[in-house]
Each structure stands twice: as structure tokens, then as C-alpha cells.
């Protein structure tokens, strides 16, 4: 199985993803022909070799109507106070992050000059994707990335994904970054992805239309829920919402480099030459055994006999929101015959401390047991399936040849669609799974 391990040494952004794939062997014509394929007038893509510190890397420059966005300075370094505009209707990748790795390329400049055109809704973006007629895998990845981006903005602003206008995340240059990356993943035949952890998100602050915001900005926080994070290595923005959305759409495993037979290494360059850390996204491409993946997880347990039953689901919900991979409750018969509950929490190794503190805070327990265990995981992916009432994601378990051996519709998607349409949840679930089975039979 062809596997890509990414190491966000100096950042994680859309143009860095695209540069990395080109450095790994993607045909530059796939990228330079994107504007025509996407119907983007006045857009040109240039590919060039550059250096970032000790690394030779590939940089992608998107020129829109003769102009290219410059990298902006972090707030603390900017004597002229460039504003990073964010939010529905007037947005650049979540409150000002750059399409590069660190600080914003501006949607609007302080002098009132408006750059890179108009905003787009999710429907607008998906319409562009529909016209491009990407291969099935590239199409699924692009939809997943864009849906995550719009959903994050909607949550940040208390809106719905369908009503949010992402100004720069929907603009021409970012469309090239996101859709080009997803097409490149498919063209290179990359079947699985992992990412070094923790992901370094930078630090400091940026200024946007809503005021001064801490790094990571709210949209990045929303997208990277459940991901092992750390501050640094520099006091500026290193992860953008677009870069984060692409990562999460690929459903990576987080941790050290897995066992693999290395075939190529590559580097995608950001826009900044940084003296502290090379401004590159590094990737290692190779072959792995397609059997079940093994990784280390943390297991937390605690038993309580003095909690009201109606409070139990609230704690489980907060554990999952806090980044737990899974959280379960088992009824117990405890000392003196008292009924109780056993909380069992599974988390990424390294997250146990914060989840243990959450259990101590949210439940009545006075102590939490923690251990590390091995976990074998099936290779999996998600497929977006159109039902008569809306789109539902279906999780698939894959065998060594990449064939789906079992599939189950995501419950939360089914519940949301069912509630909006006024139909039973089971009806939505069965429709999604049946549609996927029918599509699989047609493919064979």
C-alpha cells in the first residue's frame, strides 16, 4: 500500500501541501492546468524550486489577475498593523491565516484595496468541483476538505455551513490549493496518510476584523479537535484552516513514522524564509503492509457509585469533545451492593493527562487509572453518499487490496439529515448503505 507520512516542520497550509506533492513526483502539468479545468479566469499557476533553510523545496505560486498575495507579518512584528479579515462574507481562511503557513495573505488591505475577488458559498465551491469532473477519490477528498472548512467557520460564527461565505478560502488561489492537493493525492495513488505528532500550531496573535485573536485561530481549533497539538516552534501562525482541513480530510494516523519501504522524500515550501525553523512541509512516500495498523493508545478507567444516571451521558459527551477516541460506560455492582458505573476512555498516547483531569473535574471520581495498550486498527476511509434527503458519510473498513469489507453510515450524519427531513434515522441509514453497495456493484 502506498503511504505518505507528513512532517509539518515549519507549517501546514494549502500551498505547502501542493508543493510537497509536486516534489514527490506529481506531474506539474496537473497543477498548471488546474485554472482552465476549474474554469478560473485570469489565474496562472507557477511551479518553482526554492530553498528553505537546509531544504531544497518546491513552491507553488498562484497569480490571480496579475497579482500574488504577499506573506504578512505576525501581529507582534507588524509595525503597520495589517488587518486579517475573517468571518462569514469577509474571510480569509479562518480569521486571517495565510494560504501559506504563518500569517495572513490579506483579503483586504488597510488601504481598502480588495484582493482576489469575491466570496463563495459551499454550494459555489462544490459546483466548481462538479464541473471539473475529478476522479472519484479526488472528488471525495475535496468535498470532505471543503465541508470541514465551511463547518468549522459555521461553528465559530454560530451559523450554518450553507450560509457561510468564505472570502479567501473560496477564492481562486485557495481553490487551486485545496482541489489541486486532492487531485494530486489521487494521481500519486496515495492510499493512507500519517502525520507526526504533536502538530505544532505556532503561537502569538493575529489581528482580524473581529479584533486580536490567539494562535491557533478559532477555525483551526475547530478543525483539529481530537488531534495531538503543541505550541511553537515559533511565535506566529504555522497552521492554516485550509492546511488543517486537507490533513483531516485524509483521515491520518498521528504518531511517529510507521514501518515502511521508502521510495521518495519531498518538501513543500511556504512563502517565508524563516531563520528559526525551515518553512517546509516534509513528506516521506513509501510502501507499507496493508494489514491492520498497530499503534499505542492510552486507556483510562474509573468507577463511580454516587453519580446521578442522567449526568453520565454528559460526561461521555465532554470526553469525546475533549479528544477521546472512544468513551464507554458499563454498569457495575460495587462495594456494599451499590450500583455504579465504570468509565472507560481510549485516547491517543499523550492525551491521557488532560482527559484524566477532565474526568476528575466532570465526574464524582477521586482517581483515574491510566495504562498504555497496543491497538490494531483496520484501514478505513469515508465516502460521502447522496441520499434522497441529503449527504451522509459512510465509514468503510478496507482489506489489503483496498476493497471495502464492511461499511456503516455515520450516525450523527444520519440523525442530522433525518431531523431536517422529518424521516426516521434508520431509513436514512439504510438508504446511504444501500446506495454505496449499489455503486460498488456498478464499479465491479
Image: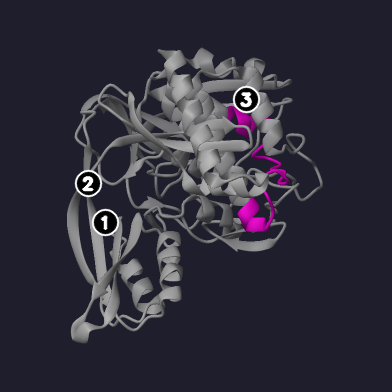
Residue annotated with mark 3: 129
Magenta stretch in the rendered image? 154-177
- Viewed as shown, does residue 268 lie left or right of 388? left
Residue 29 is situated, as x and y percent measured from the top left of the image, at 52, 13
The 10 Å Cα crowd at callout 1, few under 14, some 14 to 19, many 20 or more, is some
The 10 Å Cα crowd at callout 2, few under 14, some 14 to 19, many 20 or more, is some
Q: Are dots 1 and 3 in contact, CB under 8 Å?
A: no
Residue annotated with mark 1: 349
Q: Quadrant of residue 301?
A: bottom left
- Residue extending furthest right? 112
Residue 44 is situated, as x and y percent measured from the top left of the image, at 65, 20
- In the rendered image, is residue 59 in sight? no
Picture quarter with the C terminus: top left
**Labels 1 and 2: the sequence-earlier one:** 2
- Viewed as shown, does residue 103 lie left or right of 234? right
Q: CA distance from mark 1 to mark 2?
A: 9 Å
Q: CA distance from mark 1 to mark 3?
A: 37 Å
**Labels 2 and 3: the sequence-earlier one:** 3
Residue 154 is situated, as x and y percent measured from the top left of the image, at 65, 51
Q: CA distance from mark 2 to mark 3?
A: 35 Å
> Which residue is nearer to you in this view: 322 or 59?
322
Q: How many marks?
A: 3
Amino acid at each position: 500500500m502506498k503511504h505518505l507520512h507528513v512532517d509539518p516542520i515549519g507549517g501546514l497550509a494549502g500551498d505547502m501541501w501542493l508543493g510537497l506533492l509536486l516534489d514527490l513526483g506529481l506531474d506539474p502539468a496537473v497543477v498548471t492546468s488546474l485554472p482552465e479545468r476549474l474554469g478560473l479566469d485570469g489565474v496562472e499557476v507557477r511551479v518553482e524550486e526554492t530553498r528553505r533553510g537546509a531544504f531544497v523545496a518546491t513552491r507553488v505560486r498562484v497569480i490571480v489577475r496579475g497579482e500574488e498575495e504577499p506573506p504578512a507579518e505576525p501581529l507582534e512584528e507588524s509595525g503597520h498593523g495589517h488587518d486579517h479579515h475573517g468571518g462569514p462574507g469577509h474571510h480569509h481562511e479562518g480569521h486571517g491565516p495565510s494560504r501559506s503557513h504563518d500569517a495572513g495573505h490579506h483579503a483586504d488591505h488597510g488601504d481598502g484595496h480588495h484582493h482576489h475577488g469575491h466570496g463563495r458559498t459551499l454550494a459555489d465551491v462544490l459546483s466548481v468541483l462538479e464541473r471539473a469532473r475529478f476522479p472519484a477519490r479526488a472528488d471525495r477528498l475535496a468535498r470532505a476538505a471543503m465541508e470541514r472548512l465551511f463547518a468549522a467557520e459555521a461553528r465559530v460564527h454560530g451559523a450554518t455551513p450553507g450560509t457561510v461565505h468564505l472570502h479567501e478560502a473560496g477564492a481562486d488561489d485557495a481553490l487551486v490549493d485545496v482541489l489541486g492537493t486532492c487531485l494530486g493525492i489521487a494521481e500519486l495513488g496515495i492510499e493512507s496518510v500519517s502525520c507526526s505528532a504533536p502538530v505544532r500550531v505556532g503561537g502569538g496573535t493575529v489581528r482580524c476584523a473581529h479584533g486580536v485573536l490567539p494562535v491557533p485561530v478559532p477555525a483551526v481549533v475547530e478543525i483539529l479537535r481530537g488531534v495531538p497539538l503543541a505550541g511553537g516552534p515559533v511565535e506566529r501562525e504555522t497552521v492554516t484552516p485550509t492546511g488543517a482541513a486537507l490533513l483531516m480530510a485524509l483521515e491520518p494516523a498521528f504518531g511517529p513514522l510507521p514501518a515502511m519501504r521508502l521510495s521518495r522524500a519531498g518538501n513543500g515550501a511556504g512563502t517565508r524564509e524563516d531563520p528559526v525553523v525551515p518553512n517546509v512541509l516534509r513528506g516521506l512516500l513509501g510502501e507499507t503492509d496493508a494489514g491492520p495498523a498497530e499503534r499505542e493508545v492510552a486507556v483510562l478507567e474509573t468507577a463511580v457509585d454516587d453519580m446521578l444516571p442522567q449526568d453520565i451521558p454528559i460526561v461521555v459527551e465532554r470526553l469525546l469533545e475533549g479528544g477521546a477516541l472512544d468513551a464507554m460506560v458499563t454498569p457495575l455492582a460495587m462495594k456494599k451492593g451499590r450500583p455504579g458505573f465504570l468509565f472507560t476512555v481510549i485516547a491517543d498516547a499523550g492525551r491521557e493527562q488532560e482527559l484524566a483531569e477532565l474526568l476528575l473535574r466532570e465526574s464524582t471520581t477521586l482517581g483515574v487509572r491510566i495504562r498504555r495498550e497496543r491497538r490494531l486498527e483496520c484501514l478505513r476511509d469515508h465516502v460521502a453518499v447522496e441520499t434522497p434527503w441529503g449527504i451522509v458519510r459512510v465509514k468503510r473498513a478496507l482489506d489489503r487490496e483496498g476493497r471495502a469489507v464492511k461499511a456503516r453510515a455515520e450516525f450523527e450524519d444520519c440523525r442530522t439529515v433525518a431531523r431536517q427531513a422529518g424521516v426516521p434515522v434508520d431509513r436514512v441509514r439504510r438508504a446511504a448503505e444501500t446506495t454505496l453497495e449499489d455503486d460498488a456493484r456498478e464499479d465491479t
